Amino acid sequence: MPESRLITAEAAATRLGVSRPTLYAYVSRGSVHAHADPHDPRRRLYSADDVDRLARNKVRGRKASDIAAATLDYGLPSLPSGITLIADGRLFFRGRDAVRLAATATLEDTARLLWDCAGDPFRSAAPQPPQSVIRLIESLTDTFPVDRCLAVLPLAGAGTAMTWQRDHRRLWHDAATLLRLMAAAATGTVPDAAPLHLHVAHAWGLDERAAELIRAALVLCADHELNASAFAVRVVASTGASLAACVSAGLSALSGPRHGGTTSLVEILFEETERFGNAAGLVQERLRRGDILPGFGHPLYRDGDPRATALLALLPPDPTREALREAMDAIGGKLPNVDFALVSLRRALRLRPGSALALFAIGRTAGWIAHALEQQADDKLIRPRARYSGPAPEM
């Protein structure tokens, strides 16, 4: 593309009348294409044609109600947040590249970053919950991890509403305690003061190398902008409910098959591939039936989910995994996403079914808490209006 048709981020944002984060969101959705600056590889330039077209079409011919409705389905950014950005095929936590962060950071490091907190609340977080909570966890050791977490959370909240405007440090302390409790409940153990990835690894009988894989997975799962579970958390947080209630809302949303429950569908895909004995044939058969291929593709990443790329690069070879990826490549299919990577990790470490979603839930709790804190600090109730589509009212 001629350089004259490429413009800077500042110029593109000005033409569109949006902030830079909103411009990056347009890029992540494929509405505006970004290119490397030939004079400075560290800088990105943006297609002026795309920007002009988007500026012309952004509002023209659309009702305000239609625009509002479109934001609910991978639409334009609609809620300000300083936590996570997805742009140019990359994931950032408060400006830090999540993939780079996952190379060395712990989930505690990531939580402190996402919560934007002063000091280290994990130093003072109480590792021992009430005996009633411990007894409940011990009585549910054979329960599916997410169900166990949902059972424990009501006891963790104690009905205490958030008080962000009055006591930041107390909330950070409660957040750290809650994150430790989630890790314990997900693994059927009692909380302790160990780093979270080591706690999980010990609970599952893993060695130090495996613990490093767990650490990276937890960080990569820590947040993903305003997805279904994060939005559920923010709605509940806007009412002033407790942190535990907010996390419970996120966990409930995560359990659905269109969100975190997709890991179960990926497990089935792996099992079918091994029974069928021919990944390419299975993929073709599923496509002929009109079935979905869970674990591949993501609307926000045109060139592949960076979380999956980072995590899969750390795993040992798996013939079934590679056969599925090759079968998708052969038909020009989509690239693996984080659900595929988490199930691949679960298989590589020979963990029990359900462990992939457990890792997702533990890591994502850090992000849910960040969204709850940010929303509560905003001190504003989230209350959208419904566009009525039912029978006409009686006269």
Image (cartoon, rainbow, N blue to C red):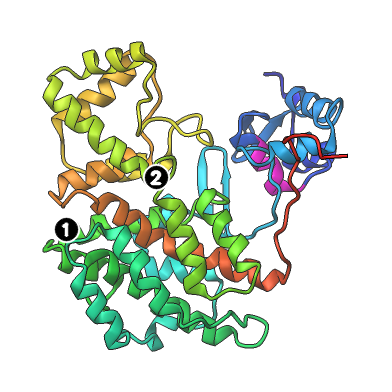
Relative depth, front residue between 190 and 131: 131
Residue 3's quadrant in the figure?
Answer: top right
Relative depth, front residue between 312 and 192: 192
Residues tagged 1 and 2 counted as in contact (Cβ below 8 A): no
Q: Quadrant of the N terminus?
A: top right
Residue for badge 1: 209
* SS for dot 2: helix
Residue for badge 2: 307
Q: Position of residue 252 (x, y in %)?
A: 44, 56
Which amino acid type is shown beneath numbered disc 2? Arg
Q: Position of residue 371 (x, y in %)?
A: 57, 63
Q: Is residue 24 left or right of residue 360?
A: right
Relative depth, front residue between 257 and 276: 257
Residue at left offset 46%, top offset 78% = 157
Q: Is residue 354 left or right of residue 299?
A: left
Residue at left offset 65%, top offset 70% = 239
Q: Position of residue 202 (x, y in %)?
A: 16, 68
Q: Is residue 368 visible?
A: yes
For disc 1, the neighbor class at 10 Å (few under 14, some 14 to 19, many from 20) is few
Disc on the earlier residue, 1 or 2: 1
Q: Is residue 10 left or right of residue 342?
A: right
Which amino acid type is shown beneath numbered disc 1? Arg
